[in-house]
Amino acid sequence: MSVVAFILLYGVSYGLVLCLISVGLVVTMGLMRVINLAHGAFAAIGGYIAIGLMTHVGLPFAAAVVAAVAFVAVLSLASEKVLFVHLYGAPELDQVLMTIGVNFVVVAALTLCFGPDVYPIRLPPWLSGSVDLGFRTFEVYRIVTMAVCLVVIGLLWVAFDRTNLGARLRAAVDNRGMAQATGINVPRLFSLTFATGGGLAALGGAIGAPMLPLEPTYPFKYLVLVLVVVALSGFGNVRAVVGVSIFVGIVDTAGRFFLPDLGAFIIYVLLIVLMIWRRQGLFAARVAT
Amino acid sequence: MKKIPGRFVAAMALSVLAASFQLARAEETVKIGIVGPFSGPFATTGTGFRQGLEAYIAQHGTEIGGRKVQLIYRDSETGSSDPSVAKRLAQELVVSDNVALLGGFMLTPEAAAAAPVANEAKTPLLLFNAATPALLGMSPYYIRMGQNIAQPAELGATWARQLGKSRGYTATADYAPGHIVEEAFAAKFTAEGGKMVGKDRIPLKTVDFAPFAERIANANPDVLEVFITPGAPAVGFIKALAARGLTKKILIIGQGEAEDNDLHLYDDSVIGFHSIIYLSAALDNPENNALKTVLHQKFGPGASPSAFTIGAYDGLHIMYKMIESQAGKPFDGAAAIKAVIGYSWKSPRGPVTIAPNRELVQNFYVREVERKDGKLQNVVIKTFEQVQPPASAK
């Protein structure tokens, strides 16, 4: 029982952070057909800025996270206008080359500014420590993180599913040409989505930093996990991201609990099996053929 | 026709003269090749090597046994390149630079790769850091200036038993040194009457350590032997242990996971973490104090004696001893090794002797992380005096 509780609690909290980081990439990939391998860089920059503001400027954790998210959202908007806009419609190899290049630049810049070591984080007192949940103790930090993720994901769902903007976005994902023909300003939608995706990644990087430690190679280190989520979600399938992320988080945690020597591989085995079985994504509606 | 032999003789004479000058100069200078990571992810190790060597030279000059000592540094690019670079550098140093001695070689694979070079050229090679037991079996020209990785693990087991701990657990990084720590601790702990209740090998790329903390907590051990690479993995693991309440509940013994210069990476959850290692920056002996003074003068107040600094510092000391033993003779590597076996001296780490198996007899210190004077630091709480090296490393 305690084992099940552990795997659920840790798997879900881990998965929710993965979800925040990945959701932006799922949308931008679906919408713009751009394979942005530099997506993890936004998460890393967000994390570094948030923790930097906390330790060096003395901002409270929450304020630092909000500031970092805002900064990265603006940064991703700018980078979309300057860099990524050239990739729309470019061959996939070009996209991969450039975004990997951006990753290398970010890794080098982070090393230069913050050093090659892991960037230390001291959680504020209200976030450290554990609480007794009745059946076991659990870290306060993870509970808060789960709550934040759930609220953000809820807002995202409302925006995507219940607003006019979300309807336009879904239309553009499904059929870009038709959406444009009906008068939807798709390029502006692109920019907005890109900025939101970057901001969400920054949020994940910042509040997830105690779970996924910040180091200069962060953009590469977590790229694989993010791509696993993206691959299993399917292009642009936002609703699937939450389920897939939690699923990945739970499988990864369970794997490392039961088979610690092999734990790191289980998620990849699963990915291979699932990609063969359901190439469109884990929760994708089966297309009638 | 007659003029040519005359010129030829003159040229011959000149070249012989030049050669004899060179010979004389070669007699006077002994070159030492230092191979270490002076760039890349392990650059702090290279910095430690260099600081230790320069501190020793600042204290003892560059002349010994009638010869002048010259250090040649080469970057092994550890972590960004493969171990064969270390071998190539050793070869170049021996063949083109004519070094008489080699030192450095941070990681075991690098030291192992260089063994054929040392063997063929009969060049003594001082390992400043590499800690795998098997290394000394690869070359009779190797002397270890650090530790044999099995030693602190065995001492950890002994100490835990002395404290009455009976349920042991090991959590070690899943690569060769980690396996040695795991086996050494378990063998000693069970031999002394304890019971092992679990062991985990942690993959090197692990990010989320909570599952390991959970497994350890569920097995309910009272002592945990840890061996994890310093930096992000060590920080992540210790934080996960703290989050599960284990740092307060059980005895945790590591090695170099929370050295003084890494402590800024941690929060207060690291308090109570124990480590067993052969040095401590806080030791109050004349040699250590003198070393600290030189380090501060030359490299600023942030420089402190680390395992890398002291490995290099003592390594150069032994090289000086070797050169001194060969004073007035052409330098003979095999004789130089023989000359320092059994040699004892006072190092900043405490009294040290080179054992016949080319390991060190040295003190080991049990340290605990405490918050003292407002900052986290390692405090020595127990000393194992003059620990004999394991017999296995012949």
Image (cartoon, rainbow, N blue to C red):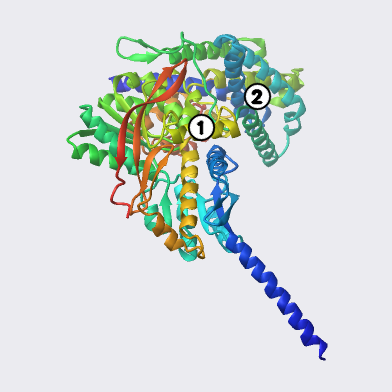
B52 or A128: nearer the eye? Answer: B52
Of circles 1 and 2, the one toward us is 1
Vertical position of residue A63 compared to residue A170: above or below: above
Q: Which mark is residue B292?
A: 1
**Residue A162: percent from the left, percent from the top?**
60, 10
Same chain, labels 1 and 2? no
The answer, for residue A197, to whether it is visible in the render is: yes
**Residue A138: percent from the left, percent from the top?**
37, 15
Secondary structure beneath disc 1? helix
The mark total stands at: 2
Determine the chain carrying the residue at label 1. B
Of the 4 image quadrants, the one containing the N terminus of chain B is bottom right
The answer, for residue A280, to whether it is visible in the render is: no
Determine the chain carrying the residue at label 2. A
Q: Which mark is residue B169?
A: none
Residue occupying the point 42% across, 58% down: B337
Vertical position of residue A212 compared to residue B98: above or below: above
Q: Quadrant of residue B211?
A: top left
**Residue A201: percent from the left, percent from the top?**
59, 22
Q: Amino acid at mark 2?
A: Val
Alpha carbons under labels 1 and 2: distance apart: 64 Å
Q: Residue furthest bottom?
A: B1
**Residue A144: percent from the left, percent from the top?**
47, 11
B342 or B307: nearer the eye? Answer: B342
Q: Amino acid at mark 1?
A: Lys
Q: Quadrant of residue B140?
A: bottom left
Residue occupying the point 45% across, 14% down: A141
Task: Determine which residue is flagged by label 2.
Answer: A173
Of the 4 image quadrants, the one containing the C terminus of chain B is bottom left
Vertical position of residue B85 compared to residue A211: above or below: below
